[in-house]
Amino acid sequence: MKAFLECVPCVLNQVVEVIQRQALSLDRKESILKSVMAELQKQPISKLSPPELTQQAHKILHKFIAKEDFYKEIKEQTNREALELFPRLEKIVKNAKDPLLTSMKLAIAGNVIDYGPAHRMDVMQTIDRVLKAELKSDHYKKFIKSLRNAKKVLYVADNAGEIVFDKLLIQQLLDRGIAVVVAVKSKPILNDVTMPDAKAAGLDQMGVNIIKSGSETAGTMFEDTASEFKKIFNEADLVIAKGQGNFETLKRDPGVFFLLMVKCPHLALASGLKAGDMVLWNKAAK
């Protein structure tokens, strides 16, 4: 999916947020921002996906700021907050009429909940709303059918914090005797999950294989992924791809199920959905 013109101010807002967290003079911050803007002017916006556009901006940021992971502290915080909540989430799934569907909804919920201290009291209310909501483009029946004979699932992760919620759905797959491979980003980009984030969330203690996808964008451009990722992607009986970035970039094979919350109104319009919709989408589903 190609970027919209509106992606440019969105990327610039992300850049400003990163710059403002750095201990730099105002003149230095302004200089960095102008360098990013100059680079974005060169980019063929309509030929790039939104995650690729973000990647170009971050390449400039890394030239000026000697920090590997701009979101390290934020990711650590969101993982901690989610882990504190995790026992309550496990009980919700255990008591659910359909534990698989419930774990799937909670996996989506993890993508949208703000874990900041000012919002902690709203977390359970947000989860309650998500659990009562219906999945849009609901291809759940197709998912269940595909899962029946599945022996290996590739789970393409999205964000830190969210990855703790993903554990609920991953455990449901493991309980069905399905081998799960979780793919994370090879290098930090935005608040996407990297190997340290996944281990901090406890995925390495679940009996899953965690691999680096090779992707350095806030999505998964298949042609740029590592050979191990390509091999597992092609061998897997089913692929679960989390988040909007993967929906915008990963190839839509019949065996790929996208699981996301639509956050961007422009993506929503282009997809025939609405901002805020919870989506389980598969190319082959009817």
Image: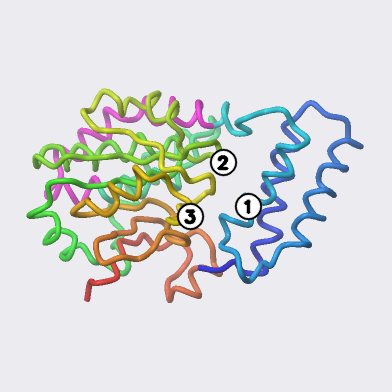
Q: Amino acid at mark 2?
A: Ile
Q: Nearer the viewer, residue 86 or 215?
A: 215
Q: Which mark is residue 189?
A: 2
Give the residue type at disc 3: Gly
**Residue 205 position (above or below residue 220):** above
Q: Quadrant of residue 207?
A: top left
Q: Quick check: 129 above or below 200? A: below
Asked if residue 97 is among those painted magenta in the image, a careful observer would answer yes
Please report whichever mark, 3 or 1, sits nearer to the chain's N-terminal start: 1
Identify the secondary structure beneath mark 3: helix
Distance from the alpha carbon under mark 2 to that under mark 3:
11 Å
Task: Give left or right: position of 226 versus 38.
Answer: left
Q: Which residue is mark 3?
A: 245
In this rendering, is residue 198 above or below 286?
Answer: above
Q: Which residues lie in the magenta part?
A: 75-103
| Whole-percent x, y for residue 221 in the image | 47, 55
Q: Amino acid at mark 1?
A: Thr
Kindly identify which residue carries mark 1. Answer: 54
Nearest to the observer: residue 33 or residue 238? 238
Q: Secondary structure at mark 1?
A: helix
Q: Residue furthest right?
A: 27
Q: Quarter of the image containing the C terminus?
A: bottom left
Query: Above or below — where is 196 with respect to 37?
Result: above
| Marks 2 and 3, the one that precedes in the sequence | 2
The one of 70 and 40 positioned closer to us in this rendering: 40
